[in-house]
Every structure is written in structure tokens, then in C-alpha cells.
Amino acid sequence: MILIWLLVILIVGGVGAWYAERRHPLWPRIIALLALGINFLLVATLWLSQGSPFAIAGQGAWLVELDWPWIAHFGIRFHLALDGLSLLLVLLGCFLGLMAVVASWTEIQYRVGFFHFNLLWVLTGVLGVFMALDLFLFFFFWEVMLVPMYFLIAIWGHERRLPAAFKFFIFTHSSGLMLLVAILVLVWTHYQHTGVLTFNYFDLLGASLDPNTAFWIALGFFIAFAVKLPAVPLHPWLPDAHTQASTGGSVILAGVLLKTGAYGLLRFVVPLFPATAFDYSPVIMLLGVIGILYGAVLAFAQQDVKRLIAYSSISHMGFVLLGVFAWNPVALQGAVMQMLAHGISVAALFMVAGALQERLHTRDMGRMGGLWSKAPRLAAISLFFAVAALGLPGLANFMGEFLVLLGAYQVNIAFTAAAALGLILSVVYALIMVQKTLHGEAEEQRRFADFSTGDMVAMGAMILILFWLGLYPQPVFDMAHPALEGLQQWVMEPSRQN
């Protein structure tokens, strides 16, 4: 029942936050914190209740599962489950949800209840995506995320929020419809071969597909997930959405929503269509490399600090795409680590960018400068997360990118060498951001508040996580290992290679 509670708490919390706005603007914030805090504690308790918290036993072990009949006539079930991989991402979602509420504490001043309603309902969809093992249920949660996220951009965003929200919705909803068509064709093809109408993930893993059919279905899945990742050339919605969203919206969008695309590639595309995935893995790995270089080059050409962070996200998520389709244990562990590290570091960078915009009323780095003398705590935090993003050894981002490159090297040396250039380019754009925002002459008449104690507590938690993942990543590797090993064993069976 813990799985259903994770969803119910967020749904009820969202409605409660919306209603509580009538009492006082503070209540929606408190309700959102309570809902996300309870969820975080529930998942952490589930993790710690294992025999060994850092080593989940069993091959591909499912820690907890819930399977209820839903629309029996069409073989649709309300099937949720958590393994180590899902649990890590659910923990990430709950934690960054808390950070998004903290980041929005002073920024959101109107329709506070409706803002937190949308925030919690986006996270309901995200958690559902990470837990669903029925493909119809997965699609249901996939679409649940979109409308609340649209409102988060369109209502509380910045000067060009409506075009950005519209572009986000068009890209993600259109790709979602392609996913629905692909799921229906997969289910129907399986029904024609077996006479069993089912949307169950495990039943469809063994679906018998001819190569041509498998290619078109796999393409539908891949495009849907690649848009959300995002992979070049399906990324145009992302820079505008990140730039125009409020700080809380950017934290959720970059820290959590992008991970649903990576999760879909890892959990569905390769296991459901292994032969097709391996046939086209060189092309997809090339897209990953292009994304790494393209995102990095575009990042250091930006003057808008949020746009710079947005393009850096394209570059960092390119490493995830490269790691998933290298498909060996080292690369997969690197991809999972990169998902977690990017989620934490980019969320922190957007919180810093939001704090700067709130104080200076600009995102133009040319009009910043001199932060060291005006706001030393904010400047120190900015410097830390800038060097984290460039992949400084000892921090989580370095661990993720290093493992992806190590795994990719076993598959394609040329792609690995080209992707490694992304690490050099990341140094360039990170140092440009540091130089333009922290150094130079400060405007004497400029007065603004430094980070408060609450801000420092939130940032301190994220710094500790990045250090922990960078210096002692073994617990995360142990946690994800059974799930990744189970997926690999399934895909690598000789019968799946035909």
C-alpha cells in the first residue's frame, strides 16, 4: 500500500494546498512541504527497512509491488512497483520537490495555492511514471505531468512565458501521442500472436515482433522519450521553457522531468526492442555525442544565465543517452549516476539563477558582476555548483560522466573521444558564468540581500549529496545494480538478439 500512498498524499496535498489559499498564503507552502516530506520519509524508510540498506538482495529485485485490476476488458491493470532504480529516482523527485517549494517561498506571491497544486500534481505524474508497470498506466501518468507543468510555466513564468509554455506542450504532447500509438500497436501485435490482450510490462517484454514492425514501434517510444530527455534535434522546447519558467518550475523541469525520458529509454526502449536498439545504437550514441558538444557550445554563447544552464542540461543529458545505448554495466551505472548528479546540480544552479533574478531583476550576466563583494554566501554557493557542473573530481557529476565515458570506450572509441571534448567545453562555459557573475566591478548603488539561513540549509543539503555521491558512490551502485543487471540479462539472452 505504500505505493498508492505515495500518489494519494501528493494528490490530496495538492487539492488541500489549493483550498488552503483562502485561509492564508502560508498554508499552501506548509501543506506542500508536509506532503513531500512525508513521501520522502516513506521512501527512505522503505530503503532503510531492507536487510542491508546499501545492498538490496536479489536479481532485479522488486522491493514492493501493487497489482490491482482496473479495466479488465482491455487487459489494463493498476500495476505499480519499485526496484532499486525506481526508488532512487522517486527519492530524487521527492527531494527536489522539497527544494522547489523552498525556492518558491518568496518568489511566488499570487495564486500561491494553485501553484503548489500544480507542483504536487506534476510530481504525482513523475512518481507514477517511475513506478508504473502497466503500459497504459505509464502513459496515463506520462500525460498527467504535462498540463500542470504547462500552467507552472504559463502562469508564474517570466516575460515570454506563454510562447514557451505553448512550445513545451506542443512538443511533449505530440510526442506523447506517438507513444500512445506505439503502445497500442505493440499491444495489438502481441494480441494477434498470443490471443492475450494485455498492457503488462512483463508480458510485452516477450512480444514476438518482426524487424520492420519492431522498428516503427521502437521509433515511437524513442521519439517520446528523446523529446523529454531532450536529445538533439528534438530539444527546441527546452531552452525557452527553462528560461521562462519560475525558479520552482525550472527545478522540477530540469531536475526531475528530464529524467523521465532517460528512465523510459532505460526501462522500455532497450528491453522491449533489444535487437532494434542494438542495430541503431551507433546512430543514437552519435546523437548523444552531438548533444554533448552542441549543448556545451551553445551554453558558452549565452548571455542569459538561465539559458546557459538550459543548454548545459542538453550537454549533460547527452552523456545519459550515450551511456544507456552503450549498454554495458559500467556505462549504465554511469548513466544512473549522471541522472542523479545532474538532477541535484542543475536544480541548485536554477535556484541560484532564480535568486539572482529575484534580487537584481535581470538574467543578463553582463549586468551582474561583483557578487563576491555584495553577497559572499550566494557567490560561494554559485562557484561550488559551477565547478560541480563542469565535472570537478570528487563530486557526483565527475563520477557519472567518467563512468559513461569508460563504458562507451568499450563500444566506440571515436564517440568516446568526441564526447570527452564536452568535458573541456563545460569548463569554458562554467568559468564564463563565474567570471561574469562573481567578478568585475559591482554597481555601488546596488543593494540586495545575501542568501538567508534557510537558503543555506537547502543549498548545504544539495552540496552534501554531491560530495557523498562523488566520494562514496558505492551505495547508489549497489542499489541500482540488481535492476540494471536484471535488464541486461533479459536483453542479452541469445533469443532476444534475433
Image (spheres, rainbow, N blue to C red):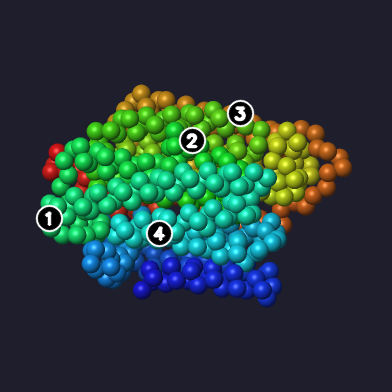
Which comes before the other along the chain, label 2 or label 1?
1
Query: Label 2: how many residues lie within 10 Å, few (<14), some (14-19) or many (20+)?
Result: many
Identified at 48% across, 71% down, the residue is: 9
Q: Amino acid at mark 1?
A: Thr
Which part of the image, by quadrant, shows the N terminus?
Answer: bottom left
- The image quadrant of residue 56 is bottom left
Which comes before the other along the chain, label 2 or label 4?
4
The CA distance from mark 4 to mark 1 is 27 Å
Query: Which residue was labeled with disc 1?
Result: 194
Q: Nearer the viewer, mark 2 or mark 4?
A: 4
Q: Nearer the viewer, mark 3 or mark 4?
A: 4
Label 4 element class: helix
Front one among 482 and 291: 291
Query: Label 1: how many residues lie within 10 Å, few (<14), some (14-19) or many (20+)?
Result: few
Which comes before the other along the chain, label 3 or label 4?
4
The CA distance from mark 3 to mark 1 is 54 Å
The CA distance from mark 3 to mark 4 is 36 Å
Query: Which residue was labeled with disc 2?
Result: 315
The CA distance from mark 2 to mark 4 is 27 Å
Identified at 20% across, 37% down, the residue is: 212
Residue 301, disc: 3
